[in-house]
Image (tube, grey):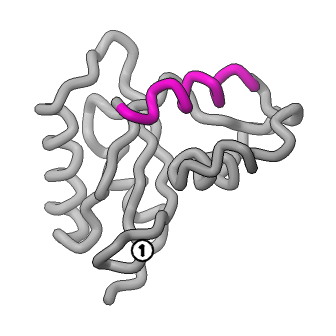
Amino acid sequence: GHRIGTAEVESALVSHPQCAEAAVVGVEHEVKGQGIYAFVTLVEGVPYSEELRKSLVLAVRKQIGAFAAPDKIHWAPGLPKTRSGKIMRRILRKIASRQLDELGDTSTLADPGVVDQLIALADC
């Protein structure tokens, strides 16, 4: 298997002109052991689409390789960040693995409402 850092995949995703921001976490995968789950925020005014999802996956495949292609792209209106701007990957991992009862303290987030939005979009 390949060991790959989240920063590499995130960098490949945000190199796409319609991607404003991305955060990647690892999730359990039946075949691979660990899969890549990407939360993607698009440039304002750009609609979510299956075509865009494929284009983002292709951008990662071209820059890094097929092994780094995200298994799931989760459209995100925003990412959970602390007041200082750090992305709370702990919360993203819990949403990605459906452990919604274990989200923990979200009071330190700059915008706690973004967590509910991400959960609502989990199956999109």
Mark 1 sits on what residue? Answer: 34
Residue 82 in magenta stretch = no
> Magenta span covers which residues?
112-123
Quadrant of the drawing holding the N terminus: bottom left
**Which residue is outermost to the top?**
45
User: Where is residue 41 shown, x and y percent of the image?
Assistant: 43, 31
**Nearest to the observer: residue 12 or residue 89:** 89
Q: Residue at x 54, y 30 (%)?
A: 118
Quadrant of the drawing holding the C terminus: top left
Q: Residue at x 69, y 54 (%)?
A: 90
Q: Residue at x 38, y 67 (%)?
A: 35
**Which residue is outermost to the bottom?**
1
Q: Residue at x 63, y 25 (%)?
A: 116
What's the amino acid at mark 1? Gln
Q: Name the secondary structure under disc 1.
A: strand
In the image, residue 46 above or below residue 13: above
User: Where is residue 112 shown, x and y percent of the image?
Assistant: 75, 25
Q: Is residue 68 left or right of residue 25?
A: left
